[in-house]
Image: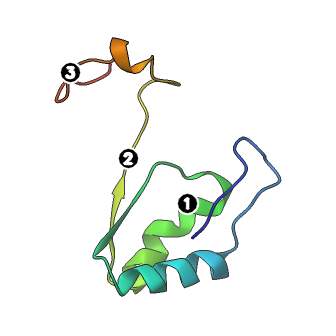
Amino acid sequence: MVTTKRNCPATRISTAQIEDDLARLANVAGCVRTYSIDHGLDQIAGLAAKHGLKVIQGLWLKPFLPTVAKRPPIGSYWV
């Protein structure tokens, strides 16, 4: 599967690599979740549709999460 070096603007995932990963994923799953559109990952929605995969676009509402002890209870939302 695709991995990138975080915050490296030179890292770009090729369409062919994403297409290959999604084709493999389509054999075992019905959807893919992504939290990024950086590094070429903005192509995922269109390519996933070609393989019959649904896409769940996640998002981070804070730049980082505090330690586990300070996190809100399960089911609450960060704002």
Q: Is residue 50 left or right of residue 54?
A: right
Q: Which residue is mark 2?
A: 58
Vertical order, 18 against 79 (above or below): below
Q: Which residue is mark 3?
A: 73
The quadrant the C terminus occupies is top left
Q: Earlier in the sequence, mark 2 or mark 1?
A: 1
* Residue 36 point in image, percent of width and height: 53, 49
Name the mark on residue 68.
Answer: none
Q: Which residue is mark 1?
A: 42
Q: Residue furthest front?
A: 69
Q: Is residue 3 left or right of residue 26?
A: right
Amino acid on which the number 2 mark rests in the picture = Gly
Foreground residue among 13 and 1: 1
- Please tell me in which quadrant of the rendered image residue 29 appears: bottom left
Q: Is residue 76 left or right of residue 31?
A: left
* Residue 78 point in image, percent of width and height: 31, 22
* Residue 60 point in image, percent of width and height: 43, 34
Q: Nearer the viewer, mark 2 or mark 1?
A: 2
Q: Nearer the viewer, mark 3 or mark 2?
A: 3
| Residue found 53% across the figure and 78% down from its top | 21
Distance between mark 2 and mark 1 Cα atoms: 13 Å
Distance between mark 1 and mark 3 Cα atoms: 32 Å
Q: Residue furthest left?
A: 75
Neighbor class of circle 2 (other Cα within 10 Å; few <14, some 14-19, many 20+) is few
Neighbor class of circle 1 (other Cα within 10 Å; few <14, some 14-19, many 20+) is few
